[in-house]
Amino acid sequence: SIHSLLIDQDGQAWVTGSNSKGQLCLGDFEDRLIPQKIPVDGTIISAAIGSEHSLLLLADGSVYGCGSNEVGQIGLGENVQASADPTIIEGLGVVESLSAGLGF
């Protein structure tokens, strides 16, 4: 899967590319050929993407995830295989940085 995530000067995130697991956080599984804004309330200060998931760090220290959760990539428990909507990851407290990837 190939996707890109960009953060603008206003703290809004924009995504484009493959969306087979909902990793674009747009509420569906349709690929996008032009950037679309992720619907999240709050200022996004950082992001990380893996092969089929995305993580968003907001200014208040909360983290949202979307995409594949087949092996727990977005921390939504074992009963959620994927989330196409940006979903807050509970129980983290205030997060200062994040990272994601494939094939470490």
Image (cartoon, rainbow, N blue to C red):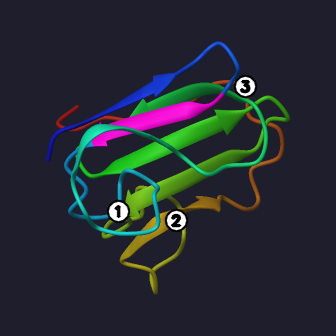
- Which secondary structure, mark 1? loop
Give the mark nearer the N terminus: 1 vs 2.
1
Which range is magenta? 12-16
Marks 3/2 in contact by CB < 8 Å: the verdict is: no
Q: Is residue 77 magenta?
A: no
Tell me the residue at 37%/60% (across/down). 67
Q: For mark 3, what is the residue?
A: 96
Distance in Å between CA atoms under marks 3 and 1: 25 Å
In the drawing, what numbered circle is on residue 22? 1
In percent of width and height, residue 73 lies at: 41, 56
Classified by dominant secondary structure, the portion drawn in magenta counts as strand
Q: Position of residue 44 (x, y in %)?
A: 67, 30
Which of the two residues, 17 or 33, is positioned nearer the viewer here?
Answer: 33
Q: Earlier in the sequence, mark 3 or mark 2?
A: 2
Please tell me the numbered disc located at residue 40: none
Type of amino acid at the residue the image marks with label 1: Gly
